Image: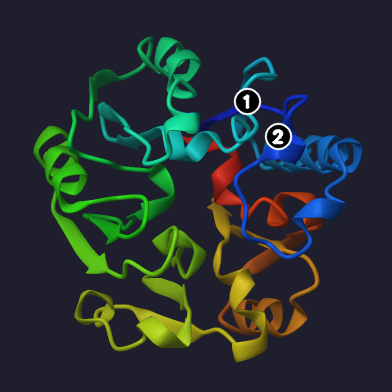
């Protein structure tokens, strides 16, 4: 079975992205475009077929396509994002995915963002956060017809900034979530306290793609038996984004 990824380069208003990062004001779109190109090339080198959408110059956060949809099996749930400025990003994604998946959308008052949904082999983990509420999680669970575990933390934006499933029953986890009951079945690689940003990783086959500049974490992942590719994603970090945010894998 082919692995596909929907991606979209940053648009002209990328500098206006929603962000609480202290270096957001230093964002360089040209560098972001270079980093996104390298990201796309890495996916292709790993055998992924890319579906590249045109940049959306009116929506600053539109390169973070992961948030627009949750794909599971033969179905896809178009999300309803918490921030009004981001609604509408999903239109072009839905047009593409409708060729491959059965689609339904989250209805008000539900909110759901793909950055809050972690895929395990036989279930999903949904963060109940600043961006996703219980109603959104429930609508997703009903449509996708799979078990959805929940971790509630209204102080964070997305759970996938703190936990990643690497494969082989292993997770990379921020120390603050080590005690979560739903994570008990997994072998845990606990992030060094100074490298918690590196929690977000993307696994393609047997390869874990990680953010550069977090060498302690990458060594831990390698020691667990995984092959690692590190990419410099500095400009996306300044928009509170990371590796999984930039693609929809299906």
Question: Quarter of the image holding residue 97?
Answer: top left
Dot 1 alpha-carbon crowd within 10 angstroms: few under 14, some 14 to 19, many 20 or more: some
Residue 122, how many percent across, how many down?
A: 22, 54
The disc placed on residue 44 is 2
Q: Is residue 1 visible?
A: no
Say left or right for 85 vs 79: right
Residue drawn at the location 70% of the way across and 57% of the way down: 237
In the picture shown, does residue 181 fall above or below 211? below
Residue 194, how many percent across, how many down?
A: 67, 87
- In front: 199, or 119? 199
Say left or right for 3 vs 181: right
In the picture shown, does residue 207 fall above or below 92? below
- In front: 71, or 137? 137
- Element at label 2: helix
Residue drawn at the location 29% of the way across and 56% of the way down: 121
Specify the color scheme. Answer: rainbow
- Earlier sequence position, callout 1 versus callout 2: 2
In the picture shown, does residue 172 fall above or below 17? below
Q: Is residue 112 visible?
A: yes
């Amino acid at each position: 079975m082919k692995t596909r990824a929907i991606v979209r380069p940053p648009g002209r208003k990328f500098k206006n992205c929603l962000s609480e990062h202290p270096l957001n004001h230093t964002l360089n779109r040209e560098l972001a475009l270079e980093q996104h190109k390298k990201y796309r090339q890495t996916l292709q080198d790993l055998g992924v077929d890319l579906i590249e959408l045109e940049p959306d110059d009116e929506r600053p956060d539109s390169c973070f396509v992961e948030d627009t949809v949750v794909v599971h099996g033969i179905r896809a749930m178009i999300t309803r994002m918490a921030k009004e400025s981001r609604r509408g990003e999903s239109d072009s994604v839905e047009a593409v995915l409708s060729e491959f998946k059965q689609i339904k959308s989250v209805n008000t008052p539900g909110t759901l963002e793909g950055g809050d949904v972690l895929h395990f082999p036989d279930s999903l983990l949904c963060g109940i956060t600043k961006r996703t509420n219980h109603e959104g999680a429930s609508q997703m669970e009903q449509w996708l017809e799979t078990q959805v575990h929940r971790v509630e933390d209204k102080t964070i934006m997305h759970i996938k900034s703190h936990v990643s499933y690497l494969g082989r029953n292993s997770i990379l986890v921020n120390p603050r979530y080590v005690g979560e009951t739903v994570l008990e079945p997994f072998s845990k690689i606990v992030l060094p306290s100074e490298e918690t940003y590196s929690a977000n990783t993307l696994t393609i086959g047997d390869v874990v793609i990680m953010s550069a500049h977090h060498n302690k974490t990458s060594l831990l992942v390698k020691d667990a038996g995984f092959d690692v590719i590190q990419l410099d994603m500095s400009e996306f970090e300044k928009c509170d984004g990371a590796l999984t945010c930039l693609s929809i894998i299906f």
